[in-house]
Image: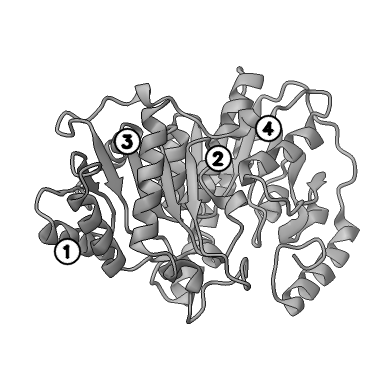
Amino acid sequence: MRGPYLVRHPLKAAAIAARDGMLRLLSPGSTPVPDDPRHILLANWGHLGDVVTTFGLAATLRERFPDARLDMVVGSWGALPARASGLFDTLHLIDHHAVNRSSASPRAKRTRYHASLATALPAIRSAAYDVAIDCYPFYPPAHPLFQKAGIPVRAGFASGGYGPLLTHPVRWTDASQPVASHYRGLLAALWPEDNWDMDDLRPRTPSERFACPDDLAAPYMVLHPGAGAAFKDWGIDRWMALVALLSAHPQTSSYRLVVTGAGAGEVAVARRLADAMPGIIDLAGRADWPRFEAVLAHADLVVCPDTVTAHLAARFDTPVLAIFTGTNDPHQWGPYSRVGHVMVQDVACAPCNRSGCAAMACIGGTTPEQVFAQMITILGASDQR
């Protein structure tokens, strides 16, 4: 952090601070919060994993305000899990160019952002929300959107800038605890008299909600090699070596191996694994979102990099092992469950809060043998549950 901001570069922090200084002239001041809001808007237009972290908060709001409508602002990339969660009445899709990971040009990303904003903003204005809560702690926040839409009560983290536009700004505390548990501060700022339990903010969905896929007889393990960002990629050679270890060892050879993924790159990796090891069930590019969730919900173990798959597995209380980089704090961004595990190399530069480096020793130093040994430990602990 640079002062109160979740940014690394000092010039960027200074620019955000200068803008916030000017925005304080527009500070809305104290605004009363309704005890029983009729219409609540959540926002998290970050990536898939960011969206999933909000599901515990959404469930908590549903329970606390059962008669209220609950909507959400997400990027189009986050629409699938948000819709499938069943927690939201309406989704407003805004693809902010600053968090768009597509291969489109910067100009195309900005064009897409302005087009999606032009569609969503009138709908948000007409919905007449009582309360809006922005869960994204980084730049760019949705606070200006809330202000433009005329929402009277606006809560969010000040760590991404634009805090003066909030009626209830919350300072981000850079503590080593799951990011979903930080949302308690947002609720406490709005309704301080209520007893908000951090454990209730853990995203959780019973696996019984999903029928076990008929063609995947237990026991099976899921390998999800794909990562949302290239610097989080563990490497195809390491995945190949891990599959060989699993196939040869008597304790793991009885498990069917399922490979999942989406997009051309992840499909190509899955095909290579399936071609190298006969018997692998290759679902990459072949499973829609409900089937993907069902596969994760009933797996004996999921192994993946730092990606949404880890958060989904944790949500179903499926044992998960996430192969992490040292670019962020795994205590904040790792899978949030008692059967969630993280592997990362202890390097002096971690956490660096960068988008990778040339060496990437934090993940490249994690060997297939280390991952395999940890998988054996997790499976043994699951057998004793």
Q: Name the residue type under label 3.
A: Asp
Q: What kind of colouring is applied to the model shown?
A: one colour
Q: Name the residue type under label 2.
A: Met
* Structural crowding at the residue carrying mark 3, measured as other residues with C-alpha within 10 Å and reported as few (<14), some (14–19) or many (≥20): some
The label nearer to you, 3 versus 1, is 3
* Gap in angstroms between the C-alphas marked 2 and 1: 38 Å
Which one is earlier in the sequence, the residue at label 1 or at label 4? 4
If the image is split into quadrants, where does the C terminus sit?
Answer: top left
Residue matched to label 2: 72
In the visual, does 157 lie left or right of 47? right
The label nearer to you, 4 versus 2, is 4
Residue 81 visible somewhere in the drawing: no
Whole-percent x and y of residue 242?
Answer: 28, 58
Q: Which of the 4 image quarters holds residue 189?
A: top right
Residue matched to label 1: 272
Q: Residue at x 63, y 72 (%)?
A: 348
Looking at the rendered structure, the secondary structure element under dot 1 is helix
Residue matched to label 4: 198
